[in-house]
Image (cartoon, rainbow, N blue to C red):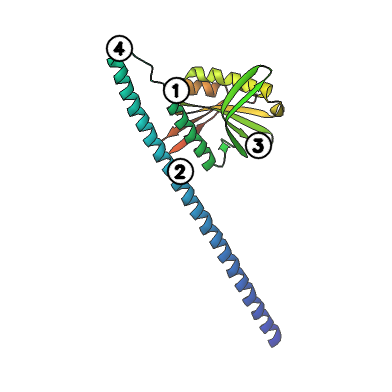
Amino acid sequence: MTDQELKDLVASLAVDSKRLKEEQAKRDEKQEKRSAEHAKSSKELKESQRQTDEQMKRNAELMKKSDEKLARMGIHLAGISNNQGDVAEEYFVNSLKNTSLKIADMNFDMLVTNMEVSRGGKHDEYDIILVNGESLAIIEVKYKVHPSDIDKLDKKVISIKELSPVYKDFKVYAGVAGFKVPQDAKTKALDKGYFVLERKGDIVETYAKELKVA
C-alpha cells in the first residue's frame, strides 16, 4: 500500500467515524425526546387518576350525606349516581388514549364517546366506540358492572350494524369497562367472547379469551 493510499484510507475512516458519531448523537437525541414524552404522558395519567379519585371521594361523601338526609325523612333510595358513571367513563377514555387505543392485540385509530344513533324509529347509545379500517369495538362503561349489563351489550352488538350501515362490513368486537367488575359479571362476559377492562390501582387490566366477532 502506497503512502497516498494509506492517507486516503485514514481519511476515509475519519469521515466514517465522524458520520457514525453524528448518527449516534441523533439517535440519542430521539431517545431522550421519547423518554421525555413518556414521562410527561405518565405524569398526566397519574394526575388524571388523582383527580378521578378525588372526584369519586367527593361523590361518595355527597351521596352519604344525601342518603342520611333522606333516611331522616323516611325516604330510602338505591345508591345509584350518574356522576359515578361519568367519572368512570372519563377515566377509561383517558386510559385508552394513553395506551394508543389498544385492546388486547388489536390496534384502533379513532375513539368516539357518547355516540347516539337513530334510524327507522330505533335508537341506541354507545359509551365508547373504537374504530380502525376494518373493525370497531363497542365498550359499555359502568362504575360497577353487573351480569345484566352483559345482556345489554348483546343488543348493542346487533344494533350497531342495523343503525349504522357504514359499519355493516366491519368486524365488531365488544367489551365492558368498570371500576368494579365482580367475578360473575367477568365470567359471563369472557364466556360470551367479550373483553373486560377493569381498574386495578393506577392501571387498567384487560381480560380476554377468544374475542367474539359479530
Q: Which mark is residue 74?
A: 4
Quadrant of the snapshot with the N terminus:
bottom right
Residue 115 percent location from the top left of the image: 59, 29
For mark 1, what is the residue?
A: 183
Secondary element type, mark 1: helix
Residue pictured at 64% horizontal, 26% vertical:
213
Residue 214 percent location from the top left of the image: 65, 23
Label 3 and label 4: CA atoms lie apart by: 52 Å
Q: Are marks 2 and 3 in contact (CB under 8 Å)?
A: no
For mark 3, what is the residue?
A: 132
Label 4 and label 1: CA atoms lie apart by: 34 Å
**In which quadrant of the rendered view does residue 157 lie?**
top right
In the shown orientation, is residue 129 left or right of residue 120? Answer: left
Q: Amino acid at mark 1?
A: Gln
Residue 114 percent location from the top left of the image: 56, 29
Q: Earlier in the sequence, mark 1 or mark 3?
A: 3
Furthest-bottom residue in this view: 3
Q: Earlier in the sequence, mark 2 or mark 1?
A: 2
Q: Amino acid at mark 4?
A: Gly
Q: Amino acid at mark 2?
A: Leu
Q: Which mark is in front, 4 or 2? A: 4
In the shown orientation, is residue 131 left or right of residue 127? Answer: right
Label 4 and label 2: CA atoms lie apart by: 42 Å
